[in-house]
Image (cartoon, rainbow, N blue to C red):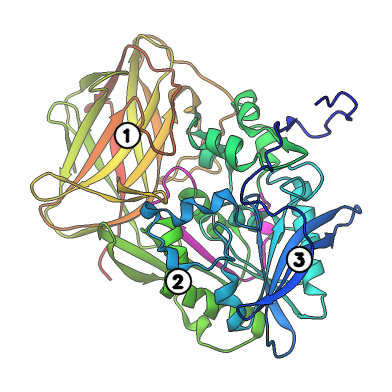
Amino acid sequence: MSHASEQPPVYPGLTFREPNPLADGNYPGFNPRSVTENGLVIDYDVAVPTRDGAELLANVYRPEHAEGPLPVLIAWGPYGKHGGRSTAPSRSATSGVRHEQLSQYCAIEAPDPQFWCPNGFAVMYVDPRGTWGTKGDYTLASEQEARDFHDAIEWAGTRDWSNGKVGLSGVSYLSIAQWRVAATRPPHLAAINPWEGLTDFYRDIAYHGGIPETGFMETFARKSLGYSSTRVEDLEPLAKEHPFYDGYWQAKVADLEAVEVPAYVVASWSNQGLHGRGTLEGYKRISSRQKWLEAHGRKTWQYYYEPESLENQRLFFEWALKGIDNGWTDRPKVLTEVREQHSVGTFTAETEWPIARTEYTPLYLDTVTTALSEKPSETAAALRYPAQGENNRARFRHVFTERTRLTGHAKLRLWLEADGSDDADLFVVLRKLDRVGEPVPFPFFALYDNGPVALGWLRASHRALDPEKSTPAQPWHPHDREERLEPGVPVPLEIEIWPSSTLFEEGESLELIVQGSDFMTNVLPGHRVTRNAGAHIIHSGGEYDSHLLVPVIPAP
């Protein structure tokens, strides 16, 4: 099939997917109809107009016996309003979501109509422009998508079955889209519930610390964004063409300060390398006067569909969209789960994020004893490890002498020299060890059970700092240029370690690992291509103040 007659794309990197990827065995095709079943009135493939004359396709679910107009929850994402093949991961055995928890109507990462409609809400799933049966070109997290989403909100808020108040719900991309459209301030948008959705495509997923991510980006770009009969943004090659933070990546960033609508933001410590950092940045930066944060350490989909989480969502949306005084506003502004081990933790109430009373404490690297010490060594020393292959790592350990809670960002200041390369890609890992030195595993991403406490990354040539955005605990790299390494010259690196929250009892340990490749292999995220060669040399003591800065939370 030739496309020579097609007009050239007006957006960079648009491509056709061939053969037609809509030949999905689960895709019902375009079939507008209205049915009543299982207590629901369902309108399929409803045409939703946009300001430029295009139409989006949506499925609308309402309770069969509604008493008056309904508030509307919208889920917006590229995975298919019908569920489709992408529903499978969230219902897999390792996701923690039991099959019986979700109805046949629930799309991936979306609010389940079978739960929300009986509770007095309408639910609307939208296939964005250029996905599935909706015509046009698909561009993700773009200005065009935000405009379309804005128009869909306004359409939903003005139906005769709507009470004029619209809320947004959903996980991952369904949250990413929320940040962007909320900044456009649709008049009928009354509340958002971003549930683990990144806010910076470059820093949060495409280039961790300047290191190209090659696992999730490939899967997401080729499998999740390919369901279109028209053109879609070819994210994977575009990422390679834009190795620095430039206008391409900036165009995907929401104007978070413009978001003023009430927000219930949910982040996780387990989502290292995708949503954890960005969700917390979103909470910090939005201007909403009424905003709440909940940060947990469980698996993404499992936590979203847990009965207690659904109850919290219901209370929030009933307050925001129905005006019910149900005690929601008495809820603590910030709840953080302090993890002890896999699926064991305690939520603590805070008044702000980051926690104001945090005592950022340096633990100094000793390359002779491989300890993390409260005082630096007076004598300079160095530790060498191979940058590739087996044993391409250095380990340091701190044993706690009293019960200690760490919650927030950590930072590694590392004096590094590369022998055999003019650059170095560093992978930083924090792990909890029990009293006998065995690793304590935690949930990781949405599917894994053997994750660390936290991760960090940095390509040494991207070590430049933005002095205005950086804080003592959180370095901010502009990623707009490279500064290659000189042979035999150690340089100081400030490495951001993504936020986490962990409790250490007396005798338990914090382990710092610095290595030249991914800590967890054959999982997402992944980084197959590095600039590592030869050896890395870590300098400590004397003039080399290599240290790990940890966020100690004193007892109330």
Which residue lies under the disc numbered 1?
519
**What's the CA distance linking mark 3 and mark 2?**
24 Å
- Tell me which residue sits at (58%, 39%) in the image: 223
In the picture, the quarter occupied by the N terminus is top right
**What's the CA distance linking mark 2 and mark 1?**
31 Å
Q: Is residue 186 above or below residue 494?
A: below
Residue 262 or residue 167, whichever sits in front: 167
Mark linked to residue 309: 2
Q: Which residues are magenta?
A: 254-274
Label 2: element kind:
helix
Residue 180 or residue 405, whichever sits in front: 180
Question: Where residue 541 appears, x then y in whole percent?
Answer: 21, 28
In the picture, the quarter occupied by the C terminus is bottom left
For the question of whether residue 408 can be seen, the reply is: no
Question: Where residue 76 appears, x then y in whole percent?
Answer: 67, 58
Judge from the rendering whether residue 417 lies leftward or rightward of residue 16; answer left or right. Answer: left
Which residue lies under the disc numbered 3?
153
Question: Where residue 547 appears, x then y in whole percent?
Answer: 28, 37
> How many other residues sit within 10 Å of disc 1, few (<14), some (14-19) or many (≥20)?
some
Residue 384 or residue 165, whichever sits in front: 165
> How many other residues sit within 10 Å of disc 3, few (<14), some (14-19) or many (≥20)?
many
- Tell me which residue sits at (44%, 68%) in the image: 100
Question: Which amino acid type corresponds to the residue marked 2 in the rendered image?
Answer: Ser
Question: Where residue 397 appears, x then y in whole percent?
Answer: 17, 39
Label 3: element kind:
helix
Q: Is residue 498 above or below residue 514?
A: below
